[in-house]
Image (cartoon, coloured by chain):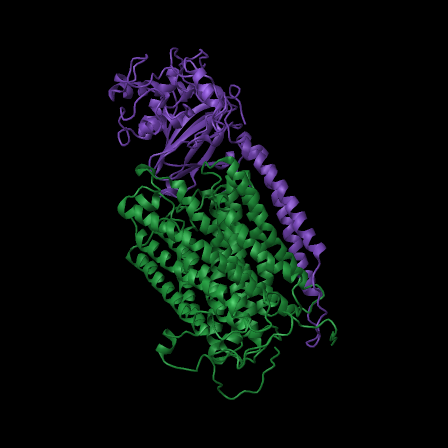
Chain colours: A green, B purple
């Protein structure tokens, strides 16, 4: 492992030790400290969501619903979805790595609105408290999609608490997006032109657009569900004059773009990681950057592909189908460009790069199965089956979680000033990859065979594949536990990291590890393109 | 350990063309996955880092390559789109000779009723080789009627009729699942579709149905609720004559015309003021919301359907094809036709009094439903 450590004083002043005491953390406006607050909170929610998933996989090892009651099982998958989507995936990379890195990458001291940034975290926690309350008081059983009229009229669970929790957390997401957009527009260091922005910043910018434009729609939708539930205003329940399909239009108008809120930041991480460990400027920089924006725009036009079997007009379905194919093109462009970046590169196999390999492969599978779902006739058979479950876990876990873990390892030295143990980390990445595929691969087959999702008990012929899936889940759990342990360990015992342990390009690597409170001693002056590992004229051949 | 299969059984016409498309897409997906994995591993190994000080020459990119790997995949996707859309299209409109069966979903069971009055729960019996059309309603939340062996699924949405149709090809017993999460016993809302030889089916069908046909049940409701006091079967009633109504085009007092299909009848029972027939008053008929459940409404509908063959109606009885958008979602592809019940199924072609008026209205209404050939499909 190469470290280019500049000689430093024993304990240099950094954002971590500049001030002390719990107040200095809970009232901080430092984007890096807020990133740490988020890191701790989303890790807790991830663990909680993971426990729910573990219990579900345990139940599904046998066809009979013998471990839990049906109500408990329904609450488990609902809470797994709500916690993972709204309290882990959506904030995951933006609120941690995005918060930490965007100001540093554009050469700024902080985000544009540091206090608003702190407010976002408090809103997130406040929303999380409501979600936790709904769990503690007895749970919610509507599914994370809150489909009406079940959620608005029929469910006897703690729907209101969960709705309020998601509603509040939504504002955290909006404010974070707003902060990032303004920061990218107004806070770039001299010389940091749009064409020189790191690809991570481009992808976060595209993500922020979706957060700001889409989240208010889901907030309104959930508020309307609450209104109907509390005051019987007929909006979605046909028994009182509403239309249940209206809910699906409004919900997916946000929640499909939300899928891109979850995956675009991961794509940004992969662009950085692949460039660094190939020691090369990404192939087709402008196409990768442009495809992020294309995804953000097209992502708003495909919501109806969730509704091919609801009875929506078949002409509408055809339009949504072809647009769904179109939105796959920019994703394909990214995959090809990442692969091409390694061509004639100098590829190192550090842990973040292993996660990037995993991401490219698994995201490809997630994307291709998405094309199958965009095909009208195929969707009719496999929608609402385990095929869909497998598809979106390949994108959300194989894609986003892999990118998140890759990014966390990549910037861990920058964030903490310590190296993680490389051998353990590589081992964990491998375990995660194997466990993941074993968990979700069989679910594609289950779905095509016809096993519907959200089934507490199932027909016995589905058992072998379910046992395989549950076995994989136990391996996956180990894959998640190992990094949790060694990353904590590294905080104290990890090798001290230099400013730029990977020899990476980008302003964040010019600051010390961990960075001082205001990131840079002087405002950086950017004079070169992004990822200028080797200027065209001087090619070093070692 | 049960037998292991990669595919569910295929037991309907809708399933046979389907698996070919499926395998085509699986093949494309596998090839692309292999290409990407191979590319990643080849480059990663071939260009592995051999020296810490070596910095490779940058490559800016290639517009030609970018266009190639955007356009070619999209062309392949277009084949997915057209093939998938063609099969989807095929499954939209039932043929005119389809047999009608009614399905009412409620937490947590499937209630099936045949026009002759036979009822089943969590079971559906259908004959081989006969197109079957299900008209589906929900009493409570959204459910979804899913038969993997037919590769078909359709949500059953409260407040509207959704329908699906299929032609079974292989006798046997096949899974019926509820595919849309509907509450506590969602995973218990399962049943069986039994495909039978035609003869066996006919024997089975006549063995049940002690209560009388759906139409006769509907007639009882119609009289009990006093509908017949206003809906007289001549022109003297305060409400429209229902003879010859079903499947015809109705001129409304706001100038629109609608086709009197199942969805229209349901709406007129539950929300009578929504569409007032030309020449009649608002606020005469009370709503029957809350008094009739979905099964009873279907029985009344069957009764009104049975009146379609009786002459003397005031409506145009021209058989129409499906309208654009399908109104509230109910397809009317085989409106009024092809039921297995005992009453006549042929539609009258009696020149109706209001026809000229209705057609004149049509000409002024570009968006209005246009008459199509009998039983015409899109």
Q: Position of residue A178 (x, y in %)?
A: 45, 62
Q: Position of residue B153 (x, y in %)?
A: 47, 36
| View extreme (bottom): residue | A9
Residue B338 in view (yes/no): no
Q: Position of residue B253 (x, y in %)?
A: 36, 24
| View extreme (front): residue | B364
Question: In this view of the protein, which residue sits in the foreground, A427 or B90?
Answer: B90
B293 above or below A289? Answer: above
Q: Is residue B163 left or right of residue A500?
A: left
Q: Which image quadrant: the C terminus of chain B?
A: top right
Q: Is residue B284 left or right of residue B26?
A: left
Quarter of the image holding residue A275? Answer: bottom right
Quarter of the image holding residue A136? Answer: bottom left
Q: Is residue B198 left or right of residue A242?
A: right
B284 above or below A63? Answer: above
Question: In this view of the protein, which residue sits in the foreground, A69 or A398?
Answer: A398
B56 above or below A440? Answer: below
**Which residue corresponds to the image point at 48% horizontal and 64% vertical from the top-left?**
A94
Q: Position of residue A202 (x, y in %)?
A: 56, 63
Quarter of the image holding residue A3? Answer: bottom right
Residue B251 in view (yes/no): yes
Q: How many marks?
A: 0
């Amino acid at each position: 492992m190469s470290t280019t450590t500049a000689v430093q004083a024993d304990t240099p002043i950094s954002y971590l030790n500049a001030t002390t005491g719990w107040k200095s953390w809970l009232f901080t406006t430092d984007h890096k400290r807020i990133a740490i607050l988020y890191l701790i909170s989303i890790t807790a929610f991830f663990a909680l969501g993971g426990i729910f998933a573990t219990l579900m996989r345990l139940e599904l090892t046998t066809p009979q619903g013998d471990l839990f009651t049906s109500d408990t099982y329904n609450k488990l998958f609902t809470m797994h979805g709500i916690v993972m989507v709204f309290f882990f995936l959506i904030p995951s990379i933006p609120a941690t790595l995005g918060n930490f890195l965007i100001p540093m990458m554009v050469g700024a001291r902080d985000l544009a609105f540091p206090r608003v940034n702190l407010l976002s975290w408090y809103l997130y926690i406040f929303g999380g408290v409501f979600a936790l309350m709904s769990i503690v008081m007895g749970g919610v059983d509507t599914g994370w999609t809150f489909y009406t009229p079940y959620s608005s009229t029929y469910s006897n669970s703690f729907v209101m608490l969960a709705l309020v929790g998601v509603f509040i957390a939504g504002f955290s997401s909006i404010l974070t997006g707003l902060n990032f957009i303004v920061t990218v527009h107004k806070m770039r260091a001299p010389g940091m032109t749009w064409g020189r922005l790191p690809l991570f910043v481009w992808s976060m910018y595209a993500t922020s657009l979706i957060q700001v434009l889409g989240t208010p729609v889901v907030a309104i939708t959930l508020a309307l569900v609450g209104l109907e539930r509390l005051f019987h205003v007929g909006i979605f329940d046909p028994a009182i004059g509403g239309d249940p399909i209206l809910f699906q239009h409004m919900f997916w108008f946000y929640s499909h773009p939300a899928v891109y809120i979850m995956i675009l930041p991961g794509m940004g991480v992969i662009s950085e990681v692949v460039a660094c460990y190939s020691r090369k400027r990404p192939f087709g920089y402008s196409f990768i950057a442009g495809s992020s924006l294309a995804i953000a725009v097209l992502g708003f036009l495909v919501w109806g592909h969730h509704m091919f079997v609801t009875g929506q007009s078949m002409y509408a379905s055809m339009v949504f189908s072809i647009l769904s194919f179109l939105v796959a093109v920019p994703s394909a462009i990214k995959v090809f460009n990442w692969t091409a970046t390694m061509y004639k590169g100098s590829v190192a196999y550090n842990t973040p790069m292993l996660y990037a390999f995993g991401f490219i492969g698994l995201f490809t599978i997630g994307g291709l199965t998405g094309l199958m779902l965009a095909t009208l006739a195929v969707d009719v058979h496999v929608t609402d089956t385990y095929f869909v479950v497998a598809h979106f876990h390949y994108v959300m876990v194989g894609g986003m979680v892999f990118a998140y873990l890759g990014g966390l390892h990549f910037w861990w030295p920058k964030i903490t000033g310590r190296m993680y143990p490389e051998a353990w980390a590589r081992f964990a990445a491998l375990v995660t990859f194997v466990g993941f595929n074993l968990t979700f691969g069989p679910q594609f087959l289950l779905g095509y065979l016809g096993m519907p999702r959200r089934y507490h008990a199932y027909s016995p012929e589905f058992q072998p594949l379910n046992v395989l899936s549950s076995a994989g889940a136990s391996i996956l759990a180990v894959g998640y536990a190992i990094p949790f342990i060694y990353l904590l360990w590294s905080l104290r015992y990890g090798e001290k990291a230099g400013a730029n342990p990977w020899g990476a390009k980008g302003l964040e690597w010019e600051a010390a590890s961990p960075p001082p409170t205001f990131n840079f001693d002087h405002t950086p002056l950017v004079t070169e393109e992004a990822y200028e590992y080797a200027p065209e004229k001087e090619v070093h051949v070692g | 350990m049960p037998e292991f299969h990669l595919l569910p059984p295929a037991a309907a016409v809708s399933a046979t063309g389907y698996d070919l498309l499926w395998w085509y897409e699986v093949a494309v997906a596998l090839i692309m996955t292999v290409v990407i994995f191979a590319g990643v591993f080849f480059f990663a190994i071939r260009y592995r880092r051999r020296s810490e000080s070596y910095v490779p020459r940058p490559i800016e990119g290639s517009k030609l390559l970018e266009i190639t790997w955007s356009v070619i995949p999209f062309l392949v996707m277009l084949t997915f789109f057209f093939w998938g859309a063609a099969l989807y299209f095929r499954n939209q409109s039932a043929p005119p000779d389809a047999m009608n069966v009614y399905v009412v979903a409620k937490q947590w069971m499937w209630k099936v009723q045949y026009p002759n009055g036979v009822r089943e729960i969590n079971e559906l019996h259908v004959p081989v080789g006969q197109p079957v059309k299900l008209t589906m309603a929900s009493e409570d939340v959204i459910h979804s009627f899913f038969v993997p062996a037919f590769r078909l699924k359709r949500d059953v949405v409260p407040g509207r009729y959704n329908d699906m149709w299929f032609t079974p090809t292989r006798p046997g017993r096949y899974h019926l699942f509820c595919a849309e999460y509907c509450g506590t016993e969602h995973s218990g809302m399962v049943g069986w579709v039994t495909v039978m030889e035609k003869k066996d089916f006919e024997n089975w069908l006549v063995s049940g149905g002690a209560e009388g046909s759906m139409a006769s049940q509907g007639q009882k409701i119609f009289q009990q609720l006093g509908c017949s006091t206003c809906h007289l079967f001549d022109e003297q009633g305060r409400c429209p004559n229902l003879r010859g109504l079903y499947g015809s085009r109705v001129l409304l007092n706001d100038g629109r015309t609608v086709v009197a299909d199942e969805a229209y009848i349901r709406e007129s029972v539950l929300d009578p003021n929504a569409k007032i027939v030309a020449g009649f008053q608002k606020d005469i008929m009370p709503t029957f919301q809350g008094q009739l459940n979905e099964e009873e409404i279907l029985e009344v509908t069957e009764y009104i359907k049975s009146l379609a063959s009786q002459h003397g109606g005031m409506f145009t009885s021209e058989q129409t094809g499906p309208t654009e958008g399908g109104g509230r979602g109910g397809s009317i592809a085989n409106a009024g036709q092809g039921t297995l019940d005992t009453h006549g199924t042929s539609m009258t072609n009696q020149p109706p009094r209001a026809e000229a008026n209705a057609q004149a209205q049509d000409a002024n209404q570009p968006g209005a439903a246009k008459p199509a050939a009998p039983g015409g499909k899109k």
